[in-house]
Amino acid sequence: DGGYPYEGVVTDGVNLYGMTYYGGINNMGVVYSIDKLGGPINILHEFMGSANDDGSYPYGKLVLDGSTLYGMTRTGDGIVESADCGIIFSVDVTGAFYTIVHELTYSDGYYSYSTLMFDGIDLYGTTYYGGASGDGTIFKYDIAGGTLGFLRSFSPAQSSDGHTPYGNIIQVGTSLYGTTYYGGAFGLGTVYRTNLDGSGHTILHNFRSAANNGYYPYSGVIQVGATLYGTTNNGGSAG
């Protein structure tokens, strides 16, 4: 019934929906639902991998739009055979309708570890590798139009830009906020802001090893009022 869930769950008020990184018939992960009061796991989809024109090893959390769930896999592909770069997929809450929404390529960005963000119209996400410089991207997927576009290709050569993002992005007004694991002025990661149209990319903080600073942020940020909060994987007084 799946194993190793790396992220949390979403709910429609009745059921909880989530993904596991391993498990299922091919040990490549599953999408599942479970009554929020408990009970047996209901498998909505078992990932089959690129040999079967499917994604594999889902990471991040699902997003729910009505009766449709959207998510990403770290690897795998579909009919186009896009070099095992991962997919964006949808599945309805009953598991009856599973669709590969988009197959990622090297130029799109690949190996996503983040959760998709849904603004009610479009999906936004990040990839750890790929894009113009190979160091990750921020992308936008137009659900209605069925097209994927770039908001940013991260590059260490672009004015101490951060790169290789692990964490999720959030929307605050007309801007997206997130973190990169590497890059920035000290090479140890950043907090950044990017407008929804990809303009106005700004580094808000460069992580560093001096004093009690943390560095290498795995996670994204959350917003409380006018403040962003987050965590780092290394650094601090105890390392």
Image (cartoon, helix red, strand yellow):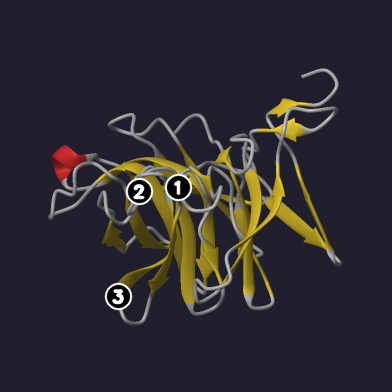
The secondary element bearing badge 3 is classed as loop
Indicate left or right for 144 with 191 as reference: left
Q: Earlier in the sequence, mark 3 or mark 1?
A: 3
The residue positioned 47% from the left and 42% from the top of the image is 59
Report which residue position mark 2 lands on.
133
Q: Position of residue 28 (x, y in %)?
A: 33, 34
Distance, label 2 to label 1, CA atoms, is: 9 Å
Q: Earlier in the sequence, mark 2 or mark 1?
A: 2
Q: Residues within 10 Å of mark 1 (few under 14, many from 20)?
A: few
Residue type, mark 1 in image: Ala
The circle on residue 146 is 3
The secondary element bearing badge 1 is classed as loop
Residue type, mark 2 in image: Ser
Residue type, mark 3 in image: Gly
Q: Residue 198, relative to residue 158: is it above or below?
A: below
Distance, label 2 to label 3, CA atoms, is: 25 Å
Q: Earlier in the sequence, mark 2 or mark 3?
A: 2
Q: Position of residue 75 (x, y in %)?
A: 31, 40
- Front in this rendered view, residue 186 or 56: 186
Indicate left or right for 152 with 149 as reference: right
Q: Which is more foreground, mark 2 or mark 3?
A: 2
Report which residue position mark 1 lands on.
157
